[in-house]
Amino acid sequence: MDPKQYASFFAEQGYLVLSDLLDKSAVDTSHQEIDRLHQIALRLLDNDQLNGSDYQLEPYAKTDRTDDKPVLRKIENTRSHSPWFSTLASHRPLVSVIQSLLGEDLLLFRSTLMLKPAHHGSAHAFHQDSAYWPMDPPSLITVSIALEDAIPENGCIKVIPGSHRGELQTWGHIAQEEHAPLTERKEVDLSGQIDVPLTAGSAVLFHSKLVHGSGANRTDKSRNTALYAYFSPDVRYKPGPNAPQRRSFPVIAGMNGATEHEMVAG
């Protein structure tokens, strides 16, 4: 697709697949970095320092470690923990596509590793990202980069195309046990849901109002994802009364060459 086709498809469907975004070398480096971060998490776990950190254990796993690794569900704020994943947020082919959808000035809202460990990776209930984020209007773009082949058996992303054109809703808890339904809300029409399988190094972009989820990892291999969320500076920061009223966001592109952009609640 050319940029105009990207924009047209994304506006209509709410998601977009980018095949072979990363080459094998970049995928291999990502695997090595994930191993390194697991070793950091293991030290935190051994010293009873994991709770309250950016490293989160799988809530439904029967053990907190396997094969001398902690059984992690996710690592938040990877930009602060990993130079590699910080750099990956500015991957030029990716940024070019995001700019074609959001404009030249780009800020980074979130930098996360979503991890689905072998046999333990929990399901993610259907939800809309913007239901949990203090940003208005809810027009961010989430990017999920597959670091292993993602298929239904290991919990690839499921989306409901076009659902971003509906209203923002309340969804509740995201992490679910393996056999739990991906939503208990009877009014949610799931008839249009589709799986979005990806090869390692490919990515899916989706609107922050798109209804999406994923199944559990039922295989004997982990399935890991580098996840980023981008937004235009036209989006306002609107935290709750008990949250910080000022927040700085990394600049990914544009903004007259600035590296950080501070927003004040309002």
Image: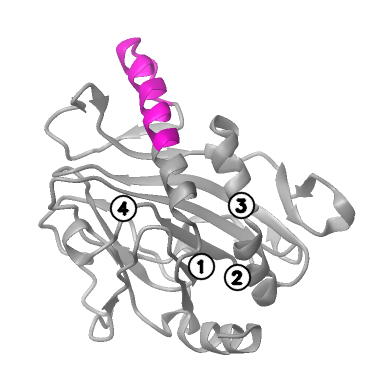
Mark 3 and mark 4: span between their CA atoms? 21 Å
Q: Secondary structure at mark 3?
A: strand
Crowding at label 3, few (<14), some or many (≥20) Cα neighbours within 10 Å? many
Mark 4 and mark 2: span between their CA atoms? 22 Å
Residue type at tag 2: Ser
Instruction: Say if residue 266 shows up in the picture.
Output: no
Which residue is pictured at 13% across the width and 51% down the height?
A: 219
Mark 1 and mark 4: span between their CA atoms? 17 Å
Q: Which mark is residue 143?
A: none
Which residue is pictured at 26% across the width and 80% down the height?
A: 187
Q: Which mark is residue 208?
A: 1
Give yes or no for contact between labels 2 and 1 (Cβ–Cβ under 8 Å): yes
Residue type at tag 1: Ser
Q: Secondary structure at mark 1?
A: loop
Q: Secondary structure at mark 4?
A: loop
Residue type at tag 3: Phe
Instruction: Say if residue 111 shows up in the picture.
Output: yes
The answer to whether 264 is drawn above or below residue 208 in the figure is above
Q: Earlier in the sequence, mark 4 or mark 2?
A: 2
Whole-percent x and y of residue 240?
Answer: 59, 48
The answer to whether 122 is drawn above or below residue 64 in the figure is below
Crowding at label 4, few (<14), some or many (≥20) Cα neighbours within 10 Å? few
> Which residue, given by chain and number where applicable, does mark 3 sit on?
109
Q: Earlier in the sequence, mark 3 or mark 2?
A: 3
